Image (tube, rainbow, N blue to C red):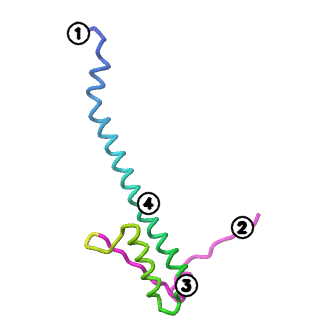
Amino acid sequence: MLQDPRGNVAAITALLMLPMLGGFALATEASGWYFINRVAQNAADSAVLAAASNNDYASGGTGYITEGKAVATSYGFTADSSTTVSVSYITTASVAACASVLPPVASTTT
């Protein structure tokens, strides 16, 4: 009776069911993390594009900041105790300072 190979597949499947379910649960959780990350990045990208297309140069950046926060809010990211929403207004001087720190980029022609 102990040397009868029938039923081995059922016993092995029963033993491996817990690790398989754990792997499925981890994969599901990781896909949720990825989805939340993508939604946050899409909200940030949309806020930047909306603020940039606002063309409110005269307000000293307050129009950009208001527009960016409004778009982030429309994606469900409101500033509260668990979420920080910040929009920065970058001036021409700060862009020039950042560009001066970057190393030169080699260009190639084909």
Which image quarter holds the N terminus? top left
Query: From mark 3 to mark 1, how far is it between C-alphas?
Result: 81 Å
Checking the image for residue 87, the label placed there is none
Rate crowding at label 3 as few (under 14), some (14 to 19) or many (20 or more) other CA atoms within 10 Å. Answer: few
Q: Are marks 2 and 4 in contact (CB under 8 Å)?
A: no
The image shows residue 13, relative to residue 106, as above or below, that is above
Residue position for label 1:
2
Residue position for label 2:
108
Q: Identify which amino acid the numbered label 1 is placed on.
A: Leu
Helix, strand or loop for disc 1:
loop
Mark in front: 3 vs 2: 3
Q: Main secondary structure of the magenta part?
A: loop
Look at 30% across and 25% down and name the residue there. 13
Q: Identify which amino acid the numbered label 4 is placed on.
A: Arg
Stretch of the chain drawn in magenta = 83-110
Query: From mark 1 to mark 2, how far is it between C-alphas?
Result: 72 Å
Helix, strand or loop for disc 2:
loop
